[in-house]
Every structure is written in C-alpha cells, then in structure tokens.
Amino acid sequence: MGSNLTWDNIYSSRIRKDSSHFDWFCSYKDLKALLLPLLHEMAHSRKHIGQPLHVLDLGCGTSDVGLGLFRDSQIPLLISCIDWSKPAVLAMKQHIQEPPVPKHQDSHLDYFEGDVTDLHDIPSGSISLVLDKGTSDALLRSGTERAQRLVQEALRVLHMGGKLVQLTDEDPDARLPFLEKAGAGPAVIFHDLGEKDGMSYYAYIVTRFSK
C-alpha cells in the first residue's frame, strides 16, 4: 500500500468503472461535523477578517472531503489537495471542471500531483489545517520512516496555531507514541469517531505551538 504503482492501478481501475469518488473510510459526510466547526474555531481564534484559511489534504486520492469542505464552509477556504497518483489527480481535476457553488465566494479548490513526504513547493508556516486521512496508515505499511516524514513536513508547513488532523483506525496506544516520535509532542487531542463497517476510527489533532 506504500507503492505509487499500487495506487495508480487502484485509481485507474475505479475510474474505468466510472466511480468518481472513493473513500477507504470516513467520507465527507462522516467528518463534516468535526471539520467544519474546527475550521470556524480556527478562523475565530485568529481574528479572521476574510482572508481564506489554507487547507492541505495530503493523499487525497478521489475522496470527496476537499470538495465537501469547499462546498459547505461559510468561511473562505483555499483547499489544496495533493496525491502522488496521477490518475487520481486527473480524475478530480476533471470532476471539478464544473464544481458546486461554494457557500463563500472567495473559496478555492485545486488538485496537485506530489509527494506528501516532501512538500518543498509549500512555504513553511503557510498552512492553517493539514488533513491526513489514512495516508500515514498506508505509508506505515512500508515502515515508519516515510510516515514520520509526512508528519514532519505537515508540522513544517503549518503556521503557529495551525493543526494537523490525522484520521485513522489505529488506536491511541499505537498512534500517540508514533506522533510523539515523529515530532508532534505529547500534547495531542484525540476523538473516538465510532465504528463503521466493524472498525473503530479516531481523529488525532496536533496543534503547532513551537518552531
């Protein structure tokens, strides 16, 4: 699951079957009650005056999370969705040629091909919220090194007070030590998202407080 070719084959197969959106778990409807209030809280805490919050979705695939946030957020969002699978990115770019009308006219959504463990094109301290929905889980199948780099890059691009949200089926006994070793520090908030299809899911929220 940590191979680029594997994901290209997965997404190419699904695109041939005319399936525009696919989520391994936790689609937008499962997460909007968590993410929309979190974004509003962040905007309020920064005395938001109309400048878009920059959201970065790492390993977006053909998920509908970025599209849902773009459509429903009442505050302006600049949403950048990145994946290393070219077929997935092309499919989503084609899908948003006729995007839904966002609730805020200044919101913007785009998709990019790239490596989530090397975000060299994104300036440090420029992102408000980083989403990692199962991407680190896939990287962990090949060992901890690349998954740790994902966390480190996410923390680098976050501005002070920005948040990394990891969505995973890994329980706190395993995920909290991983995040601490990756540089997230010991102060991580987590939420039990409940069960879906017999699996328990969690949201881990890391706030960047130091350089």
Image (spheres, rainbow, N blue to C red):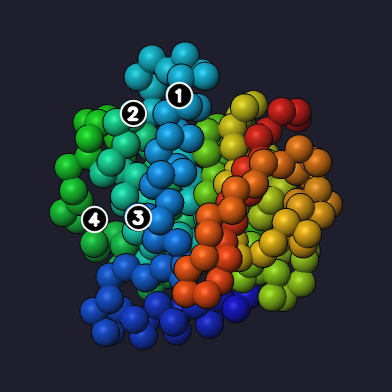
Q: Which quadrant would residue 101 be assigned to in this image?
A: top left
Residue under label 1: 43
Residue under label 3: 29
2 and 1 marks in contact (CB < 8 Å)? yes
Q: Earlier in the sequence, mark 2 or mark 1?
A: 1
- Which is more toward the observer, 100 or 82? 100
Circle number at residue 96: 4
Closest to the camera, between mark 2 and mark 4, is 2
- Which is more toward the observer, 205 or 130? 205
Local secondary structure at mark 3 = helix
Local secondary structure at mark 2 = loop
Q: Is residue 18 left or right of residue 32?
A: left
User: Residues under labels 2 and 3: Cα distance?
Assistant: 18 Å
User: Residues under labels 1 and 4: Cα distance?
Assistant: 26 Å
Quarter that holds the C terminus: top right
Q: Earlier in the sequence, mark 2 or mark 3?
A: 3
Q: Hey, what amino acid is under mark 4?
A: Ile
